[in-house]
Amino acid sequence: MDTNNLETARAEIDQIDAEVVRLLNDRARLAQRIGTAKNSASKAIYAPDREHEVLANVTAAGADGPLTDRQLTAIYRQVISACRALERPIRIAYMGPAASFTHQAAVERFGDTTEFIPVASIPDTFAEVQRGDVDFGVVPVENSTDGPVHETLDNFVDAEVKICSEIMLPISFQLLSKAESREAIKTVYTNPVALAQCRGWLAKNLPTAEIMTVVSTSRAAAMAAEDPTTAGIANLLAAKEYGLKVIDAEIQDLSANYTRFYVIALAAANRPTGSDKTAIAFSIRDKVGALRDVADVFARRGISMSSIQSRPSRRRVWDYIFFVELRGHAAEPNVRDGLAELEGQCVFVKTLGSWPVDDN
C-alpha cells in the first residue's frame, strides 16, 4: 500500500470510528432507558440470559470475519459493561488479593467499568452476597487439572444464594519482571500451584534462578515489582496491576488448563436459552441403589448429568451431599418434573440455580 492509499484508508477508519462512537452512544442511551425500566420493576441489572442472547447475535452478525467470535465477544463484553454501568453501577466480590485469577475472571465477565471488592476467602464472598453488601460474587468451582474446589461446594449447602452464571477462564502463567531480559533474573517468586504447573519451563529456561514460594500469584507479582533482578509468575492482570513487563508468556507446561467460576447472587431469574445448566445439591436415603435411582430419574427424561461431586455432610456423621450439574433449565418441563420426583426420593434437595452455558 503506497502513502496515498495509506492515508485514504486511515481517513476511512476515522470516519468509521466516528460512526461507531455515535452508535455506541445511541446504544448507551437505550441502556439508560432500560435501566430506568428495570429499577421501576425491581429487575436485576445483570441478566445472563439476555447477555447470552446479545453475544450470540453479535457473533452471528460477524460470521464473515475477519474478527473471530472470541474477539467479538471480548469487545462486546466491554461495551455491555460500560452500558450496564450507566444503568446502575454494580459491585462484585471476589477472593483477593487484586490480580488473582478470580479477579481476572470477574473482570473478563463484567468489564473494567465495575467496582470489584477483594475479600479474604471464599466464605467471605458468600457472606458479602448474603448480606447484600455486593450485587454479585465470583467463586471458583473447579479446575481442569486440580479438580473441584471443595470450599465453594460446601458453602452452597447453607448459603441462601443462587448461581446465575458461569465463567470459563483459560489459565496461563506469565513470567513478569522489571528486568530488561530473562538473563537478568536471579530469583523467581511463585505460589506452589503455579510452580507445579511451570516447573518444566523453569528448569529449562531459568535453571540457576532461585525459586521462592509465596502465598499467591498476586504476591509473587508484588514482590517482583520491588527488585528488577527478580520475577514473578502470575497472570496478565497482575502485569497491569503492578507495572511489570511480560518477559515470557504462557510458560505453563500444559496448555489446556481451565478454571470454571460461578457468579452468585441473592436471586437469579434467568430464562431458558436452549443451552443451559442447572445445579442441584442432594442427600440420598441410606438404602441399596439410592444413587442409581436418582440417576434414573434424569435418565428416563433424557437429561444428562454433566458433573457429579460428593462432599461429607456437615449435618450428619457419615452422610454425604452430592452436587450435580444437569444439562437443561429448571423451568423446562422435563427438568422441573425430574426435580419434583427427586424431592420424594431424597432426604435433602436444593436447587442452586440455572444459567446459560459458557462455551468459551
Image (spheres, helix red, strand yellow):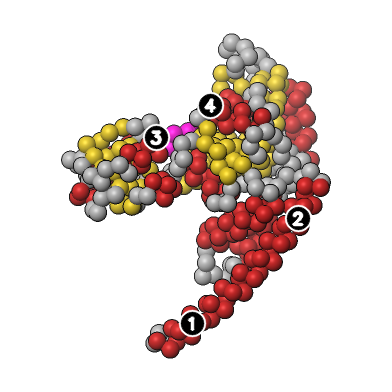
Location of residue 329 (image quadrant): top right
Q: Distance from label 3 to label 4 (Cα)?
A: 17 Å
Q: Please state which of residues 187 and 256 is positioned toward the viewer in this rendering.
A: 187
Task: Find out whether residue 86 is within the magenta segment.
Answer: no
Can you identify the residue that label 2 sits on?
34
- Check the image and name the residue furthest to the right: 41
**Of pointers 1 and 4, the one earlier in the residue sequence:** 1
Q: Distance from label 1 to label 2 (Cα)?
A: 37 Å
**Of pointers 2 and 4, the one earlier in the residue sequence:** 2
- Check the image and name the residue furthest to the left: 208
- Check the image and name the residue furthest to the bottom: 4
Q: Distance from label 1 to label 4 (Cα)?
A: 54 Å
Position of 335 compared to 320: left or right? right
8 lies above or below 358:
below
The percent coordinates of residue 243 (x first, y second) are 37, 50
Mark 3 vs mark 4, foreground winner is 3
**Of pointers 1 and 2, the one earlier in the residue sequence:** 1
Q: Amino acid at mark 1?
A: Ala
- The answer to whether residue 175 shows anywhere in this view is no
Can you identify the residue that label 4 sits on?
151
Residue at (59% x, 67% y) in the render:
62
Q: Is disc 3 surrounded by few (<14), some (14 to 19) or many (20+) residues within 10 Å?
A: many
Q: Which residues are magenta?
A: 145-150
**Of pointers 1 and 3, the one earlier in the residue sequence:** 1
Q: Amino acid at mark 4?
A: Glu
189 lies above or below 284:
below
Can you identify the residue that label 1 sits on?
9
8 lies above or below 97:
below
Instruction: Check disc 2 and report its element: helix, strand or loop.
Output: helix
Image disc number at residue 216: 3
Q: Distance from label 1 to label 3 (Cα)?
A: 47 Å
